[in-house]
Amino acid sequence: MSKIKLVIFDLDETLWRMEDGYCSILRPPLRETAPDTLADSIGRTIKLVGGVRELLASLSEAGIILSVASKNDAEPTTEVMHRFKIYDYFKYPQMEWNSKGKLVTRIIDLLLENDGISIKPEEALLVDDWESNVNDVRDLGVRTLHLSTDISRIEEVKGLVLEDDL
Ligand SMILES: [Mg+2]
């Protein structure tokens, strides 16, 4: 199997958790109510999953390209990524109401067009908590980790990618 060069993360219930709904229903202004926790103007909260920033740092330091494919509006999703200090880890993050297959394909195309980086489908990995998203992307030949059946904790991605144990 080829080594993983690109890891694409889902956001809602993968890198962060909400009590209810998805990121783009949040209504700014957002305020920090606890470490790595934001509340919107009507008190709905969103919390970064523990260990996520460390995971992104480790993968990035190992030379893995990181990106995002999320079914959300660009705002306030982009703001939430900035507020959680994770935005800068991602290359060409895609937040759009479109199939994950389309979003993943676009990231791979942008890396080739803009950076001359060629990623084969089997060198890319999607981490997502929704089985339908995983199945959609797997049809392209992209590798997948389904959060809950393949892994139970997001930190497990680090060992599996860096030790090439997928
Ligand atoms: Mg999700």
Image (tube, rainbow, N blue to C red):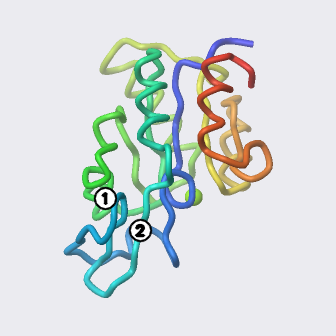
* Residue 139: % across, % down: 73, 38
Which circle's residue, 1 or 2, is located before the other in the chain?
Answer: 2
Dot 1: few (<14), some (14–19), or many (≥20) neighbours within 10 Å? Answer: many
Q: Do the residues bearing badges 1 and 2 touch, measured as CB atoms within 8 Å?
A: yes
Instruction: Tell which residue pokes out farthest to the front in this image.
Output: 34
Indicate which quadrant contains ligand 1: bottom right
User: On the rendered structure, is 29 left or right of 159?
Assistant: left
The amino acid on which the numbered mark 1 sits, given as a three-letter code, is: Val
Q: Which residue is drawn at 73% across and 54% down?
A: 131
In the visual, does 135 lie left or right of 98?
Answer: right
Front-most of 41 and 34? 34
Indicate the quadrant containing the N terminus: top left, top right, bottom left or bottom right. Answer: top right
Q: Secondary structure under badge 2? A: strand
**Residue 86 falls in which quadrant of the image?**
top left
Instruction: Say which mark, if any, is on residue 80.
Output: 1
Q: Which of marks 1 and 2 is in front?
A: 2
Question: Image quadrant of residue 123?
Answer: top right
* Three-letter amino acid code of the residue under disc 2: Ile
Residue 46 - label: 2
Q: In this view, does 149 lie to the left or right of 63?
A: right
- Looking at the picture, tell me which residue is in the foreground, 122 or 151: 151
